[in-house]
Amino acid sequence: MVEFKTLKTEEIQFGNNNFIEVARKEAVAEEGSNEFVAISRGYYAPDGSKRFKKSFAVPLAPEVVDFICTKVKEMAGEDLAQAEPVEENS
């Protein structure tokens, strides 16, 4: 059986009630463990709890991480890539 541990999370809210969460996670099994980054999209339920709608895992291979970061910035366009960052709520 695989157990998932969340090591660190960061999130940003957008729209009326939505968020994107980037989390470093670890999958632990009898055969060993594997760390990865999970990018998830979700919303807040009326009771304030998080509800996740979609998620995908990114392996920690440097070439994969670099590829994703580069292509997201390229496809978002220079205007978005150079916009000033939004302050996070603490």
Image (cartoon, rainbow, N blue to C red):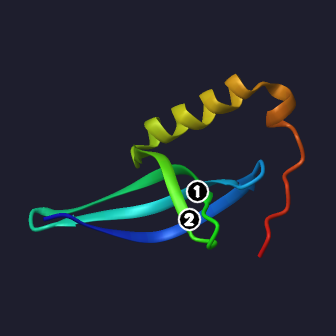
Q: Quadrant of the N terminus?
A: bottom left
Q: Is residue 21 above or below residue 66?
A: below
Q: Position of residue 84 (x, y in %)?
A: 90, 47
Q: Nearer the viewer, mark 1 or mark 2?
A: 2
Is 6 placed left or right of 39 in the picture? left
- Determine the image quadrant of residue 48: bottom right
Q: Secondary structure at mark 2?
A: strand
Is 64 placed left or right of 32 in the picture? right
Residue picked out by circle 1: 21
The disc placed on residue 83 is none
Dot 2 crowding, Cα within 10 Å, few <14, some 14–19, many 20+: some
- Determine the image quadrant of residue 7: bottom left
The structure residue drawn at horizontal position 79% and vertical position 65%, both measured from the top left corner, is 88
Q: Position of residue 71 (x, y in %)?
A: 61, 27
Q: Position of residue 23 (x, y in %)?
A: 50, 60
Q: Secondary structure at mark 1?
A: strand
Residue closest to the far front: 46
Residues at circles 1 and 2 in contact by the CB criterion of under 8 Å = yes
Q: Amino acid at mark 2?
A: Lys
The structure residue drawn at horizontal position 71% and vertical position 55%, both measured from the top left corner, is 17
Residue picked out by circle 2: 50
Q: Amino acid at mark 1?
A: Glu
Relative to the observer, which residue lies in front, 9 or 40?
A: 40
The structure residue drawn at horizontal position 69% and vertical position 25%, both measured from the top left corner, is 74
Q: Is residue 49 above or below residue 72?
A: below
Q: Quadrant of the C terminus?
A: bottom right
Distance between mark 1 and mark 2 Cα atoms? 10 Å
Q: Is residue 52 above or below residue 82?
A: below
Relative to the observer, which residue lies in front, 39 or 35?
A: 39
The structure residue drawn at horizontal position 54% and vertical position 34%, both measured from the top left corner, is 68
Q: Position of residue 19 (x, y in %)?
A: 65, 54
